[in-house]
Amino acid sequence: MSELSGSALRIVHTHGERVAIREVSTGVELLNYVYRPEAAWESPKPYLHPLRTLAGDVVTDYRPNDHRWHKGLQMTASHLSGQNLWGGNTYVPGKGYLELPERVGSMEHVAFDELVAEGGDAVISERLTWHPYSGEPWAEETRRIEVSDVDPGAGSWALTWTTAVTNRRAEPLRFGSPTTAGRRMAGYTGLFWRGPRGFRDGRVVGPESEGPDLMGRQAPWLAYSGEHDGRDGHATLVFAHAPENDHDGSRGAHPAHWFVRNEPFAAVAPSLAFFDELELAPGDTLTRRYRVVVADGSWEREDIVKYLAEHPW
């Protein structure tokens, strides 16, 4: 085990297992980044859990009984050139979800290039490889997770997740989703958050409207507020696209659409390929950057807009 400390944050690395980031003044462990491989059926990959508010409340779920492969906040690829780098059953057109272990792949930790805590910021920089069930390397990923803007007075902090995936095959990688395979409004893939069970029936807010009908819509950000079990109070998570993501495709990028549910469970994903497949040519790199703001309390739209304006990219 090793530790690195800045003035506000401390990194604790349990080698071969996880990296934790702790806020010094409150003693709250804001996140655990777990990179130890887990069950093959659940598509082994690193994930963040538990994710906590500055008050210490957990805002992620882990291996819920309805979907054992849902683990906190993680990068996924539900349909990737015929493989499932998400976990569990695979959606097959005309047949529904089938148990096909020969299609379940993995995202494997290779090395950390940087573990740094300086001042009020912390960085986890990592290299990974993506594999189909047969094990050959299909893609290389560089991933950067940053913690910043920790504000105990406001009860909020920010996590930035950057991913760059390079195709190492001799043919294109096709990113899809159950919806691209024919299932209506199930476009989940990419960065995926599963909220705790108490967040069921939570409030979903977008820039211009609110409610679960934001499923499949485009917007630069989306927020989810839920109420805790076990103790009084709420928390809000704000998910935002970086400007370079070109989330609406207006500058030529593949468009992104929000996957969001508050029933029968809480989940949010800025889907890479909701309605149409994204094709990544051999040697090309797909880069996306997202921010997740974790806040105590139930934020209104004006609170979210103000925060994002005061914390520009």
Image (cartoon, rainbow, N blue to C red):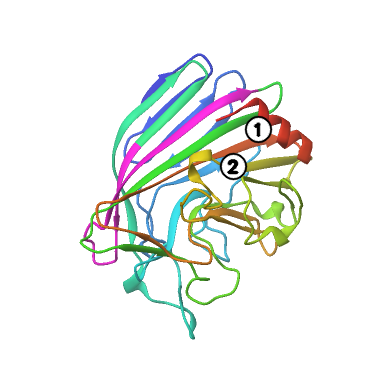
Dominant secondary structure, magenta: strand
Tell me residue 3's x, y (percent): 39, 23
Callout 2, which amino acid?
Ala
Q: Is residue 134 magenta?
A: yes
Crowding at label 2, few (<14), some or many (≥20) Cα neighbours within 10 Å? Answer: many
Side of 250 relative to 143 (left or right): right
**In the image, is residue 250 above or below residue 154?**
below
- Residue 240 has which mark? 2
Disc nearer the start of the sequence (2/1): 2
- Residue 117 has which mark? none
Q: What residue sits 60% from the left and 18% below the top?
A: 25
Rendered-image quadrant of the C terminus: top right
Q: What residue sits 70% from the left and 41% below the top?
A: 236
Side of 29 relative to 215 (left or right): left
- The residue that disc 1 covers is 308
Q: Are marks 2 and 1 in contact (CB under 8 Å)?
A: yes
Tell me residue 136's x, y (percent): 21, 60
Q: What residue sits 65% from the left and 61% below the top?
A: 215
Residue 35: tell me if it is visible. Answer: no
Q: What residue sits 69% from the left and 58% below the top?
A: 214
Between 146 and 303, the residue placed more toward the observer is 303
Identify the secondary structure beneath mark 2: strand
